[in-house]
Image (cartoon, rainbow, N blue to C red):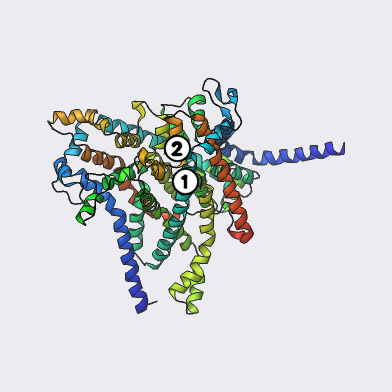
Amino acid sequence: MKLGSRIGRWLKREWIYFRKNRELLMLAIPGIVYKLLISYIPMVGLILAFKFFRYDQGIFGSRWVGLDNFKFLFKAQDAQRIIRNTLLYNFTYIILGTAAALLFALLLNEVSGRMVKLYQTTMFLPYFISLVLVGYIAYAFLEHKSGYMNSLLQNLGFAPHKWYFETKPWLFILPLVSIWKGVGFSTLVYYAGILGINSEYYEAARLDGASRPQMMMRITLPLLKPLVIILFILGLGNIFRGDFGLHYFVPNNVGMNFPTTDIIDTYVYRALTKLGDINSAAAVGFLQSVVGLVTIVSANYLVRRLDKESSLF
Amino acid sequence: MPLTKLERSSNYFINAFFIIVCALITVPFLLVIAVSISSEDSLVQYGYRFIPHEISFEAFRIVFKEPSIMLRGYGVTIMITVIGTVIALFLTALTAYPISRRDFRYQRPITFYVFFTMLFNGGLVPFYILMTQYFHLKNTLGALIIPLLLSPYNILIMKGFLDKISMEIIESAKVDGASETRIFLQMILPLSTPALATLGLFISFAYWNDWFTALLFIDNDKYVPLQLLLVRILSQIEFLANSPLAEAADKLQFANFPTLSVRMAMAILAGGPMLVIFPFFQKYFVRGITVGSLKG
């Protein structure tokens, strides 16, 4: 009886709150419904990883097969290769990308006046073209017969390369392209972070006779740390997800290069569209999501234990 | 404060550094432009060069001679960009506004609900099946518009901006008897113009440059946007040779169809408009992008 009346009171209170907030809730409803349809319902589809999907039977009608879909991961050489490639490339992109963007932002902060804008605009340009176009640009450089790289090499007295049919060069080309494309945006994010730092810190430091490098090391960098860490954690959450466009269009999807260009995402795409192997693709997608969540939560946990302020949530 | 001698020389050094960086970033674009305005013969003979051996606008002439391919691509791309950006912008603001209100009781759960999708998702396969088997969106404009409507990252930017609008304005409007919908439409939206401009630009770039949803959901020629057109041309040279463009080239009595320069010309026509527009909006960026914390 007592419990019943307590629940009753609680319901009544919640009802009053609900009436007070319902207008704002109504405004949020379209977004909530959209996310439900586009993001949450596909999460239910993760059970496909444990089923043998048939179009005529649908997601729920298809037969359960347990871990069968994951089997190829333990058998095929493909699996080892795409997982290794995805992880190594992503680590490279995160570390090189962060380092370059931080360096650029710090230096940009030392440049005065009009030039800043020019540099920013220029560095930002590649961010605003699609990876398909980046593929075209790569093609203009790397094409065997007419590409610029080969004529440059020949002019310098080196042998030309068949770039699209060699595996090794991609280990350098892909990170280079990734930085070329992304550094402008990341630099701007950090630069905006630097501009957001309270100028009183710098004035106080100047009064104490600090030099500019000292201010950079003692004020700017420590205050940027939370931003760097947050972006790093977010990056880690995607460690198992590769940049499909970069790895699909820039190497031009040439099969011979798969040992060094293929990543989970290009593999899943091929499995889905070319091979029609929906089941392995679903299993890999399941792993991507789960590993992503686990890495992001554990990275966040570690960061929170070390420095509460820098954690993401 | 006057610069010391050391600081001035380091300034020169830093400027030189950025000039080199900017040159390295721009050079690839120049190569594509140079190739597109080179004559096919000189490309075959001398390869791609930064300074065209023989300038020729033949590639552009051919593309414009048989404009139907490009025009259809432009039509689809412009349509999804305009419709998508308008709806996405409104939906983003609509979702960001309630979760920017600290007095909203469901602020935290809804914020979590939205941002959780950044950390976890169903992956490509269930999404693909949902879109094609349940929503029946394959080969429709909807397939190109719907997936990009609401990104948590954009909500984050919008929320960061809305957080700075003072509660007192909202309170006073409420005292005057305005409903939340009215406050949103008549006060919040007009006050957010800078953020909406930034986001609008980002969203329209996302639509303009999107190839992934098209790659997944479009195989009907009717709804091929520019980027997918480029994908097809990049992956198969024959596509060009068998297309109306080649016929146009025949009409011009070309012995060899200039695939090399036409490719690059089409790339420029597809990517160029946005690159020309973008610098004009650049001033909003630094103000618009504030990666706030997710807490809150």
Which of B256 and B227 lies nearest the eye of the viewer?
A: B256
Please report whichever mark, 1 or 2, sits nearer to the chain's N-terminal start. 1
The residue at the far right in this view is A1
Is label 1 in a helix, a strand or a loop?
A: helix
Q: Are marks 1 and 2 on the same chain?
A: yes
Where is residue A183 shown, x and y percent of the image? 40, 55
Mark 1 in CB contact with mark 2 (< 8 angstroms): no
Where is residue B171 shown, x and y percent of the image? 60, 49
Which residue is located at x 16 percent, y 38 percent? B58
Residue type of the residue flagged with mark 1: Thr
Which of B96 and A95 lies nearest the eye of the viewer?
A: A95
- Residue highlighted by disc 1: A86
Label 1 chain ID: A
Q: Which mark is residue A267?
A: 2
Asked whether the viewer can see residue A313, the reply is no
Asked whether the viewer can see residue B190, the reply is yes
The answer to whether residue A157 is left or right of residue A257 is left
Q: CA distance from mark 1 to mark 2?
A: 11 Å
Quarter of the rendering containing residue A63: top right
